[in-house]
Image: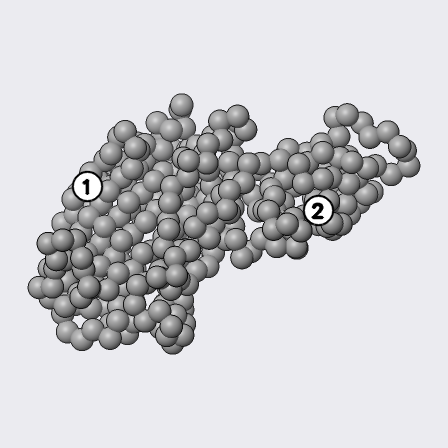
Amino acid sequence: MVTFVRDQWYVAAYGYEVGRDLLARTILGEPLVLYRTGEGEPVALADRCVHRRFPLSESRLHGDTIVCGYHGFTYDSTGICVAVPGQRRVPRTARVASYPVVEQDSFVWVWIGERERADASLIPRAPWLADPAYATVSGMEPLAARYELLVDNLMDLSHETYLHGGYIGSPEVAETPITTEVDDEKGVVHVSRHMADAACPPFYAKSTGLEGRITRWQDIEYHPPCLYLLHSRIAPVGVLPEEDGGDPHAFHVEVVYAITPETEHSTLDFWAVARDFALDDQGVSDFLRESNHTVVMQDVVALNILEKVIATEPEGYQELSINIDTGALAARRILSRMART
Ligand code: FES
Ligand SMILES: [Fe+2]
């Protein structure tokens, strides 16, 4: 069964997607319309006109108001209806829900749940995405699968060896054991895999220019429900961070996923890859964008298949889990706890 966690911040869009055109996005089954006011503030309103349900996203902006494309009910950026056709009096109940919105780290975050509980300080951070010391490529793919399948997928990177061979996979990923730590207080799951001597897959060989074998570290930080961070460190074999914490001879890639449940059986898969090298090299940006998009699509195809498999299986099917699944199982436990509270 799909577990939705309400009273949480979710990524609705990248900042660059939200502008003076109306953008429709569904989160946790709630249809939203997003736009930016003339002052540049992002706005999220319920995407259903109170009159006859016409989607506001199919309507038009007039200044900072939305004029419904069916009969002209007009809403301000707080969702209050300020004009209706054919009469002066606007019914007092004429309003659509407005959602708390925060723009941070290149994402537009929307609070889904009780308005009073929205606290912007709870939004997990991905500062690299808006940091000029990093170059970032990003995109979003819709997934015809429940979000839990994407959480499973990202928490266990041993699949890179099999599903993403020739891109980010190499034999050592599947061969090297992981360590898993759960910070229950903060509700964060850490999964680490440090490979001391590994083949350099094309994704990193071509972008960094490293030849030969590498030290490859993968340190995952999952902030349920929405934000997944993979701190990836690549260096020639034997090159470790310095004692003072500096790490000038390594390449760092911050892989960020925002996992936003759209409906019970579909997900918005926001992906971004930020690097601290070759910042002005458009060729490297193009290569990483295309490679990561290919990798994301390999996952999308696999997860869409799994969703279909689940839909047709008899009730009570028992999965079998092994060591590589420790992080994913911890994530599931936290998600179901969050869904209950
Ligand atoms: S449905 Fe929007 S004004 Fe009638
Ligand atoms: Fe993958």
Q: Quadrant location of residue 328? A: top left
Residue at point 26% right, 48% down? 220
Amino acid type at image mark 1: Thr
At which x and y percent is residue 14? 50, 53
Residue situated furthest front in the rendering: 244
Residue that extends furthest to the left in the rendered view of this protein: 238
In the rendered image, the quadrant that contains the C terminus is top left
Determine whether, in the image, residue 300 is placed left or right of residue 48.
Answer: left
Q: Is residue 123 above or below residue 129?
A: above
- Residue 249 lies left or right of residue 44; in this view the side is left
Mark linked to residue 180: 1
Residue 129 coordinates in the image, percent (x, y)? 40, 55
The answer to whether 29 appears left or right of 87 in the picture is left
Which residue is the site of mark 2?
A: 64
Residue 4 seen anywhere in this rendered image of the structure: no
Task: From the top left corner, tell me how far across and down residue 197 is, in percent.
Answer: 11, 63
Q: How many marks?
A: 2
- Which amino acid does the dot numbered 2 rest on? Asp
Mark 2 element type? loop
Residue nearer the viewer, 159 or 314: 159
Which residue is depicted at the point 52% across and 53% down? 15
Task: Give the mark nearer the N terminus: 1 vs 2.
Answer: 2
Query: Closer to the observer: label 1 or label 2?
Result: 2
Which circle marks residue 223 in the picture?
none
Measured from the top left, where is residue 288 in percent x and y?
Answer: 36, 68
Q: Does residue 237 show up?
A: yes
Q: Judge whether 289 appears above or below 9 on screen.
A: below
Q: Residue at x 8, y 64 (%)?
A: 238
Q: Residues within 10 Å of mark 2 (few under 14, many from 20)?
A: some
Tell which residue pokes out farthest to the right in this image: 86
Left or right: residue 77 compared with residue 158? right
Identify the secondary structure beneath mark 1.
Answer: strand
